[in-house]
Image (spheres, helix red, strand yellow):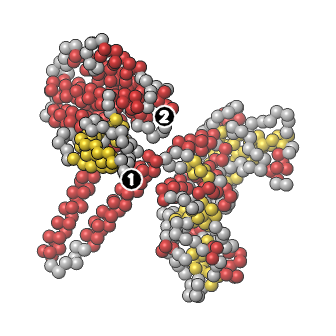
Amino acid sequence: MDLREAVAEHWDTLLVVYGHGAMEGFHAGLETAAVFLRARTADQQLLKIFRFSARDDEGAVEKDFQGLLSRGGGRARHGYVARRRPDPAASLAFDLHDPDIEDRRSDLAGFGGVSLLGDLYHQLPTLHLADAKNWTCSAEDPGAVRLLGGRDVGRDGTIAPTTEETLWGHVPESHLLAPGDLLVRSVQHPTDPGGFVVAELTPQDLPAAATHMAIPLRPRPGLDAQQRRFAVLFLGMPLARKLIGLQAGLHLGGSKLRALPIPQTDEALAKALDDVTAARTRLEEWQEEADSLLASVFLDRTAAAARSRIIASGRGLRLRVEAASLLDDLGHTVRTRLPYPVASRWREAEAQTSAGPSQGAYAAVLDTTEILLCYTAQLALALAWSSGIELGSATAIKDKLSAGRGGPGFGDWAFVLQEVSTSRKLRALPPGHPLHDLRSLLDNKETAQARQRLSDRRNDQAHLRRIDPVDLPRATSEALADLTCLLEAARFLADWPLLHFTTVRWDALTRTAALEYGELTGDHPVVPTRTMTVPRNDLEAGSLYMRDSDHELRLLRP
């Protein structure tokens, strides 16, 4: 019987205290643990776990420890009360039962799902170094393959180059690694930052097999590239190691690793990661081009030829970088990437305010605010209608129009967005639904207050309470700052182009529709005609559609 199980038959573990570098005369990296037990009674006691370092303030640690002893639940700075008593055979590693870590474990499903690593990868056999004399050989021997251990796995996710200390051997075919296999260090060194040290094998790393100082994993059939990439990314995160409860210097078992929960991506997140990966690849290509250009400065036959070539080639690189840098400028993003109704108004406000404070500049800022709220509110109304959700604000607008009291205004659009940000009905929509982004627009205190201040200013303007010329510079600056706050929160509109379908041709044989459309993105209404083919027969010529982040077309009528 395991010692912990034997102890648990008669004793309850009340407290575990971990001290890092706490014992004088021992190495500063040594971590010790003190376990406090009490004879078992009918009422099981709470388990409390505490961890401190010799570098921490002694008085603060003592005070925090006293506070933990009096707690009936929750967390202190250096320790916590376990929510449930672990099984007797379970590890009592500090991170494993931390309430914060348990919450993070539960929250992983928010990415799109959770799978155990063992469901995504199966573990390959390894060669134990204790039997090295039976299968090691020299690199020159026919059929020799490289033997990879933990030290061969680099923190940058690559396999280290061979050295004189590299092991070689003759191994069974079942032990051979393949491209796409993962190799995880079995021992986490104290100096290793983050999560597990893992590398994905490439053809250049082979032929090779793994020793017992690394854990080789092979993707199961059907595991796509995006799932593999996300698994590797998560394994390198500190949270991955904490979910297992592995402490530095201890050997990682394959069974624990296979039981690690791995978040899975939904379609929207998978596409976003693909886009980020593609962007990184493109940036790396630009860097390689720049490095190559710099390395070739003195390779031309004449200095004049080199000068001309470097200036011409460098111009293209410079223009690319300048264009990419502009996307960090909110004003440029609004002018070029947001839908036309918002972008065109912003262009006017930007031009007016650039000439200094004036009544025209102040009015342009308020007009842009109203158009932003109007556009996003109408998106919300159309999306809620198509989802079968009735909003009270929509009913209020309908009643207002029916009674002939004029069209909706600033307050009506704000009312729509406020309802969307707090509506319980919308919380039940799928995580990737665009209404969740619209809910976030006024879902925090900063944007809600900015909207309210702009609404008050718009009311004052409508009721002829004009800004005094003396106060105009400050009022214009403050209004522009509030509008900028709202536009920053509405950046998601850049992912939702506004499309005007001019022609729709349905092909009954291929069950697809050929579309001609204009993408009303940016501050100019004249746009080129584009085409696309979609497997839908419910699209309308002459109507406006929004294409969301999942590339789904959503009708914006009525």
Residue drawn at x 43%, y 35% as measured from the top left:
436
Q: Earlier in the sequence, mark 2 or mark 1?
A: 1
Quarter holding the C terminus is top left
In the image, 436 versus 98, the foreground residue is 436
Quarter holding the N terminus is bottom right
Residue 58 visible in the current orientation: no
Q: Which mark is residue 275?
A: 1
CA gap, disc 2 to disc 1?
25 Å
Please say if 481 is above or below 277. Answer: above
Residue 551 visible in the current orientation: yes
Please say if 222 is above or below 456. Answer: below
Answer left or right for 45 relative to 135. right
Instruction: Report which residue position mark 2 lands on.
Output: 429
Residue drawn at x 37%, y 28% as measured from the top left:
381
Please say if 402 is above or below 10. Answer: above
Q: Which mark is residue 490?
A: none
Q: Amino acid at mark 2?
A: Leu
In the image, 387 versus 503, the foreground residue is 503
Q: Secondary structure at mark 2?
A: loop
In the image, 356 versus 36, the foreground residue is 356
Mark 2: few, some, or many residues within 10 Å (few <14, many ≥20)? few
Q: Amino acid at mark 1?
A: Asp
Mark 1: few, some, or many residues within 10 Å (few <14, many ≥20)? few
Answer left or right for 542 relative to 168. left
Q: Secondary structure at mark 1?
A: helix
Residue drawn at x 52%, y 69% as measured from the top left:
179
Residue 354, x across and y down, in percent: 16, 36
